[in-house]
Each structure stands twice: as C-alpha cells, then as structure tokens.
Image (cartoon, grey):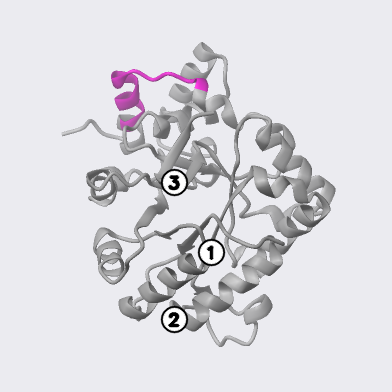
Amino acid sequence: MDRISLSPELTLSRIVYGMWRVADDPDTSPAHVQAKVEACLSQGITTIDQADIYGGYTAEAVFGAALKAAPHLREKLEIITKCGIVAPAGRHSSARLKHYDTSAEHLTTSVEASLRDMATDYLDLLLIHRPDPLIDPDETGAALDALVESGKVRAVGVSNFRPWDFSLLQSSMETTLVTNQVEMSLMATEAFTNGDLAYLQERMIAPMAWSPLGGGALFTGGPAGLLAALERIASQQEVEPSAVAVAWLLRHPANILPVLGTNNLQRISQLAEATKVTLDRQTWFELYTLAMAREVP
C-alpha cells in the first residue's frame, strides 16, 4: 500500500478506512471492531477516519472500546477525527438546533472528548468538519495551533472548505493546514473543475475524498452506461466494480486519499483492490464522460 505524506511528521495510507457507520453495525463489540481494523492492517491500510458526530456522538467510543481491548493496535494506526458540528444528540442533546461551533472552547473540549472516547493520548489529524459562517479565524487558528503545540494533535486540516475558507483560516495560523476532505466520486465530480482540487494541487496539499462511491448510488441508479463501463473494466482486471470507481480517483495526480466505509468484513478485506487497477487516460475520460452524461467541451 502506497503512503502519502501530508507533512514531514505525518504520512497516511493511500486508502483510508472510514468509520462513519461503525456505531450502526448490529455488532459493535470490541472484538468485531478489532477484526475490522485488523482486516485493514492486513492490506496496509493504517489510517482510520472518524468524527465526533458520527453515530450521534457514539462512534468514537465504539472504536475506543476496541483500542482499550487491544491497545497494541494504536501504534499501528493514524487516527483522524473531525469536530465543529453541534447537533441535538448525545453529549449535545441540549442544543436547540444543529449548528457549527469553531470557537476555541468548543474545539478544545471536543478534542478532549475524542481523546477520552478513543482511548488515546493524541490524534494524528484533526479536521474542522464544516466551514463555519461565524468563524473567527484568529481565535480558531490560535486554538488549532495550541492543540498542535500541546502534542494532543499531530496535524490539522479541514473538511468541506472552499478555497477561500481554507485561505482565511490558514492566514491566521502558524501551523500548516495539511488537507481538505471533500466529496469526490464519479457521482460528485464538481471538485475537478470548480477550483477546489486545483487550489490544493497548486499548494501540493493532498486532498481526501469522502463518499468515493457516491454513497452506493453508483450501483443503484447512476448515469446511464456508467455501471456497465465499471463492470466491463472490472471484469477485464478481475476486480469488483467498486474498485474501478475508487481507482478513478487514485489515477488523478493530486494524490487523492479516498475514505472508504463499510461494516462488511468481506468488503473491508477487498478495499485495497483499487490499488491494483490501471486506467489509461482515455478510459479515465470515458468514465468521466459517462459520469457527466456528456462529452467534455
């Protein structure tokens, strides 16, 4: 498994295992979660993606229970989590409505809760989950700098930020923002042309892609002809069609890191198949054209 360097201190596995749904699995036992992690490690997938809000603020603790039961796993992993969304659930059940909070107090409190829930002394990467219309970049930037300086967080980045949101926050920070996790897939190609990806490439910042399979929509009603093309290429290369869809992202020179989430152990064991797929330029554009349902201009 290739690795991508986000900073001199932090490298991640090219494919990231996402735990968005880990608390939704009928079996949330530490042993079962450990089996998922070990299935990832057996393929060289060492990076785990979490967020405080996942599972109504329960997913981190589900993962943490597995780390408590098998503490030796921690040193083999890079743990990513996100914060900044406040929804009326779990520890934020008193909130009147869903909103964003990027204040220093909230970020610090959220990190402490994530460390506690995931039974770890540090986070490898902390992301601001969504751009906050009320962000005070000086306050937020200083809070992120302080978290890195404290050693509780090794690196920081953002998620779902547009280039101007990224620049605003970075302008108030000493620490370098190392990634932006955005939606990218054959069902969501906007980042390839709206400046989001180009902005990161210009700065040699590796992006992360959430929902790289379009939430499963690729296989249940995507653009006409796209699934047939994925199946044809998959058959030729003896992989699953999902591996071809992920390989389409891997083919891009921006060093995109897809975040793949599933609770199915068999599917987890096949996540690395995407790295075996080769796509020439015309095949990449064939899938792109089908995804857009039109020729490129």
Amino acid marked by disc 2: Ser
State the mark number for residue 209. Answer: 3
Residue 198 sits above or below residue 62 on the image: above
Marks 1/3: CA distance? 26 Å
Residue 50 sits above or below residue 117 on the image: above
State the mark number for residue 98. Answer: none
Main SS, magenta residues? helix
Q: Nearer the viewer, mark 1 or mark 3?
A: 1
**In the image as oriented, which residue stretches furthest toward the top?**
236
Going from N to C along the chain, the mark reached first, 1 or 3, is 1
Q: Nearer the viewer, mark 2 or mark 1?
A: 1
Label 1 neighbour load within 10 Å: few <14, some 14-19, many 20+: few
Amino acid marked by disc 1: Gly
Secondary structure of residue under mark 3: strand
* Nearer-the-camera pick, 9 or 167: 9
Q: Residue 253, located in which quarter of the rendered image?
A: top left
Residue 213 sits above or below residue 270 on the image: below
Marks 2/1: CA distance? 19 Å
Residue at the (58%, 86%) spot, across then down: 95
Instruction: Pinpoint residue 54: horizontal percent, then vertical percent.
Output: 62, 62
| Magenta-tinted stretch | 276-288
State the mark number for residue 103. Answer: 2
Instruction: Pinpoint residue 230: horizontal percent, then vertical percent.
Output: 47, 25
Going from N to C along the chain, the mark reached first, 3 or 2, is 2
Amino acid marked by disc 3: Ala
* Nearer-the-camera pick, 258 or 157: 157
